[in-house]
Amino acid sequence: MKVLITGIDGYTGWPLALHLLGRGHDVAGIDNFATRRRVREVGSWSATPIPSFARRQEAVRSVLGKSISFHRGDVTRFEFVRKVVETERPDAIVHLGEQRSAPYSMIDVHHAVRTQTENIAGTINLLYAMRDVAPDCHLVKMGTMGEYGTPNVDIPEGFFEVNYRGRSDPNLPFPRQAGSWYHWSKVHDSGNVMFATKVFRLRATDVMQGVVYGVRTPEMTDAILQTRFDFDNVWGTALNRFVVQAILGLPITPYGRGGQTRGYIALEDSMQSLRLSVEQPVAPGEYRVLNQFDEAYSVNQLAELTRKVALEFGYEATIEHVPNPRVEQEEHYYHPLHDKLAAMGYRRTRELEEVLRELFRSLSKHRRRLKAKQAAVFPSVEWRRSAAAPRATAAPSAPPPGTDGMTDRPAIREP
Amino acid sequence: MKVLITGIDGYTGWPLALHLLGRGHDVAGIDNFATRRRVREVGSWSATPIPSFARRQEAVRSVLGKSISFHRGDVTRFEFVRKVVETERPDAIVHLGEQRSAPYSMIDVHHAVRTQTENIAGTINLLYAMRDVAPDCHLVKMGTMGEYGTPNVDIPEGFFEVNYRGRSDPNLPFPRQAGSWYHWSKVHDSGNVMFATKVFRLRATDVMQGVVYGVRTPEMTDAILQTRFDFDNVWGTALNRFVVQAILGLPITPYGRGGQTRGYIALEDSMQSLRLSVEQPVAPGEYRVLNQFDEAYSVNQLAELTRKVALEFGYEATIEHVPNPRVEQEEHYYHPLHDKLAAMGYRRTRELEEVLRELFRSLSKHRRRLKAKQAAVFPSVEWRRSAAAPRATAAPSAPPPGTDGMTDRPAIREP
């Protein structure tokens, strides 16, 4: 199959390209390198040094003997999107080309508006491009488990039967209660994609992805093929930050009481899921929602497990709860269903604990890069009153920014 | 109270200003005159001639002895919004300043993206402006009953108790299933406002408004105070088009089978509802959803009633069903609840049939203006395949556009 990946330069976009190539698919990609720029904007960089996209393409040629067709540009520009879709004629588009950070969207009004308008415009542009020049193409759109929030009932895969005041509807969208402008942008996208499948008779799979962990996939046979790994408070997940805190000898800092529970999936298994979604398209007019995660963990469980694995590597870490910069329930029921991918042939291959070991091994090599940006690990964005500057008070034992005498110049020249 | 109305130049914005002034409130307003421009864009104009906003302000002074503070500008520009809110320090903001036409949003990808990004940006800007300079202000935001779609169960006012797989949550947002990019933009706004009340502790009322009918309110004591009335297929409601078709001797044209049922409310009663929402604000952090309509009618019922009332005025109209340009259920269950406004003191004062008579009386005076744009009454925007040009085939007995030799120059000089 021919697969077009928007956001191909990103954390999941790049491993997905490698995985699909490895499975014999053709891969084309779009990126505007916004994540590289925006991680710099908040004073951080990828823990793993990542080469320019041109060098990535070259490496794919030299190491794997394959090629990727690449289009630099912005999915918010319709003419660009239409032209790429027309040129590539993909069987599937995996749409990862969105602003993906909740804290980034909460920085201020401009980041809020930009996150929502860019994410929405990109998705609508893709839907119209498909309608116009590739009506048979299957859209695999990245959503998030965070769209559902934390209701006091089980969470179905997108739709459920509603019984209300003596009547029933067999198939209504499950209520969404997102927790940031970013998460809401994904909710908005979901509504828009659902609508477009209906009026334009397009095919779409909406992936409610859990938090992804890990940095390696089997296709990364050479260091030059590795993907990015973000550990700062804006772009990194809680788990990423905990591992880096342990490596740097800093306390592991769960936000608030730490009972916040989410679904998690390993990077490698997420690639498997996305590939299955691509290889098993839905019918025209069909809108399929998949809950894509393997296991739910609380923030406290992640902190404890990180501390335990860190010890195996000689890192003795303490756990210090810090005030929660987010507005979220810190103790709650959490039980989302996730049966559809299994029915499509999905089998979990990785366990969190073993991936954590892999993370410690991989990241220990980049200690200097982590140390250089360690101030960025601590919370800088408040949900209730978004602040532009890092909150020094929330960072126990955190050195002030810039004490390493490092500049913000990235180690890797970027395109 | 001091009330800031965004979209004060519009169909409901202007009567609301007059109504609030009449009740002793202070009124400030924002508008960018987008509706005037965009109605021209589709080749139409208001059936009622409306003066420039400067002349409206003047009329308010001379006829009513009151004044309106006006700020020309666009709510998508944050600095403008913040400055107006800071200057006016309103107790309430009634946010009507959005693109409000479903067909307009369906014209093409650019109209789709613009509708959603503008509507969303304007609302987020207002929320941040409130947070920054008027945290105690109460936002009354215009949504639409169309957000809910047509589920097979009763529709609550925003939230309902969910029982699912043996557990229950007492208060989840009711599923939304909108039918156009415009309607989805209102869904997105609702999610965003709900979120902002939670994280910024703002006060907000989200008004799920039914279709509004009528052109007169008691405060329009002089012709110069009248509001706009749109009758073209993009900006006018089905009822508006039916009345104008009857006056022009054209067939009344329900879309499809005509079983599409929606909630309706008279303009005057809508003003009463909005005033009550303003005068009875919610607490900080509270998000109140009100279903604002009085009675549900099917399109066929509207067509029949229009034909009946038309006869009283000597207009003999036939009813001819045309292919439905929209994608919607044409026969369905429809029973939304609407008790909260009654509990706030709302009492219905107008009946559809009597307002229809008023409409025929008012619009008969403007027959020449209707005739000049009569081609615009027939469908020009297809949901499944948005078309820029009018679909001549869908307009039985409709004369081709421009046969009156009229130009698009508006009769009223606009700001």
Image: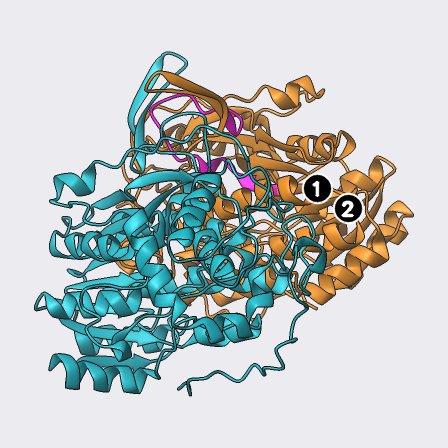
Chain colours: A cyan, B orange
Q: Position of residue B310 (x, y in %)?
A: 48, 34
Q: Is B54 situated above or below A272?
A: below
A70 or B60: nearer the viewer: A70
Q: Residues within 10 Å of mark 2 (few under 14, many from 20)?
A: some
Q: Disc 1 and disc 2: Cα gap in Å? A: 6 Å
Q: Which mark is residue B202?
A: 1
Q: Position of residue A155 (x, y in %)?
A: 35, 32
Left or right: where does residue A402 sit relative to residue B367? right
Q: Are marks 1 and 2 in contact (CB under 8 Å)?
A: yes
Quadrant in which the N terminus of chain A appears: bottom left
Q: Is B170 situated above or below B280?
A: above
Figure quadrant of residue A121: bottom left
Specify the farthest residue to the right.
Answer: B65
User: Which callout, 1 or 2, points at the residue further toward the start of the chain?
Assistant: 2
Task: Name the amino acid, label 1.
Answer: Leu
Q: Is residue B360 magenta?
A: no
Is label 1 in a helix, a strand or a loop? Answer: loop
Left or right: where does residue A138 sit relative to residue A49? left
B386 or A83: nearer the viewer: A83
Residue B245 seen:
no
Left or right: where does residue B298 sit relative to residue A272? right
Tell me the magenta residue range: B142-159
Q: Residue at x 29, y 81 (%)?
A: A71
Specify the farthest residue to the front.
Answer: A314
The count of marks equals 2
Q: Residues within 10 Å of mark 1 (few under 14, many from 20)?
A: many
A226 or B225: nearer the viewer: A226
Q: Which residue is mark 2?
A: B135
